[in-house]
Image (tube, grey):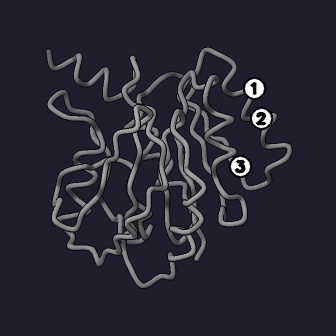
C-alpha cells in the first residue's frame, strides 16, 4: 500500500526536522508538507531536507491560512492509497513501523495510540465514537470523500473531519500500539489557541 504522509507547517523551524526524521522513509510513498506562510526559516529547512529526501514535496501558502485550510489542501494533493497526518511539532515513535506493517488494504482506518510529552497516554478505543479526533489514524484516501477540516470557534478543525469519517461507518483496525508523540501541552498550539479562544 502506498502511504502519503501529510503535515501543515507554520513557523515550525524548531520542530520540523525532528518530525520529518520520524517518518519511516521506506514506508513513505510521498511526504507532503504545506508551508502555511511561515515567517521563520521553516521553508529553508524544508528545501534543504528535500535534497536528501526525494519523497518530500513542498506546497506553499503565500500567507497564513490556518491549519484546517492546509490539511484540506494536503489531502487534495495526496496520491497515496492511504494518508497519515502528522502535525509539524509532533513526531512518530519507532513503533509506527509496526503500525505501517499492518496497513494491508483491508481496513478504511488503522488506529494507534499517542503519548503526550508529559507522559500521559491517550488510547484510541473502539468505543470512542466521535471522541479523540486527533492524529490517531492512517486513512484510506478514497474513503475520505467529502470529509474536510473546518474553521469553527466551538471546536478544533479536525472535529468535523473525524465526525464525517465516523459517520461513514469505516471498517477499522485498532492496533493498540503507542506510535505517536504529541507535543501537548504547548503554548500557541492549535489546541491551546482554540481553548484560549473559547474563554
Q: Residue at x 35, y 75 (%)?
A: 173
Q: Is residue 152 above or below residue 163?
A: above
User: Which x, y percent locates residue 18?
Assistant: 65, 37
Q: Is residue 104 above or below residue 33?
A: below
User: Which x, y percent locates residue 105?
Assistant: 47, 82
The alpha-carbon separation of the residues under discs 1 and 3 comes to 13 Å
The residue that label 2 is drawn on is 47
Q: Residue at x 44, y 56 (%)?
A: 178
User: Which x, y percent locates residue 128?
Assistant: 17, 59
Q: Residue at x 21, y 32 (%)?
A: 152
Mark 3: secondary structure: strand
Q: Extreme bottom residue here? A: 106
The residue that label 1 is drawn on is 44
Task: Name the residue nearer the viewer: 176 or 100.
Answer: 176
Where's the N terminus, which quadrant?
bottom right
Q: Badge 3: how crowded within 10 Å, few (<14), some, or many (20+)?
A: many
Sooner in the amino-acid sequence: mark 1 or mark 3: 1
Amino acid at each position: 500500500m502506498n502511504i502519503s504522509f501529510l503535515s501543515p507547517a507554520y513557523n515550525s523551524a524548531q520542530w520540523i526536522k525532528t518530525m520529518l526524521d520520524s517518518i519511516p522513509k521506506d514506508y513513505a510513498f510521498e511526504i507532503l508538507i504545506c508551508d502555511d506562510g511561515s515567517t521563520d526559516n521553516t521553508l529553508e529547512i524544508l528545501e534543504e531536507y528535500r535534497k536528501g529526501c526525494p519523497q518530500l514535496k513542498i506546497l506553499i501558502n503565500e500567507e497564513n491560512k490556518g491549519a484546517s485550510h492546509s490539511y484540506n489542501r494536503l489531502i487534495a494533493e495526496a496520491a497515496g492509497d492511504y494518508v497519515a497526518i502528522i502535525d509539524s511539532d509532533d513526531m512518530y515513535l519507532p513503533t509506527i513501523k509496526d503500525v505501517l506493517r499492518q496497513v494491508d488494504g483491508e481496513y478504511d482506518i488503522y488506529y494507534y495510540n499517542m503519548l503526550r510529552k508529559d507522559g500521559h497516554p491517550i488510547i484510541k478505543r473502539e468505543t470512542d465514537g466521535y471522541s479523540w479526533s486527533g492524529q490517531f489514524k492512517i486513512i484510506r484516501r478514497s474513503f475520505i470523500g467529502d470529509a474536510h477540516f473546518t474553521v469553527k470557534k466551538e471546536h478544533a478543525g479536525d472535529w468535523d473531519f473525524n465526525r464525517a469519517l465516523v459517520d461513514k461507518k469505516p471498517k477499522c483496525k485498532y492496533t493498540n500500539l503507542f506510535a505517536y508523540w504529541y507535543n501537548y501541552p504547548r503554548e500557541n498550539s492549535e489546541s491551546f489557541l482554540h481553548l484560549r479562544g473559547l474563554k
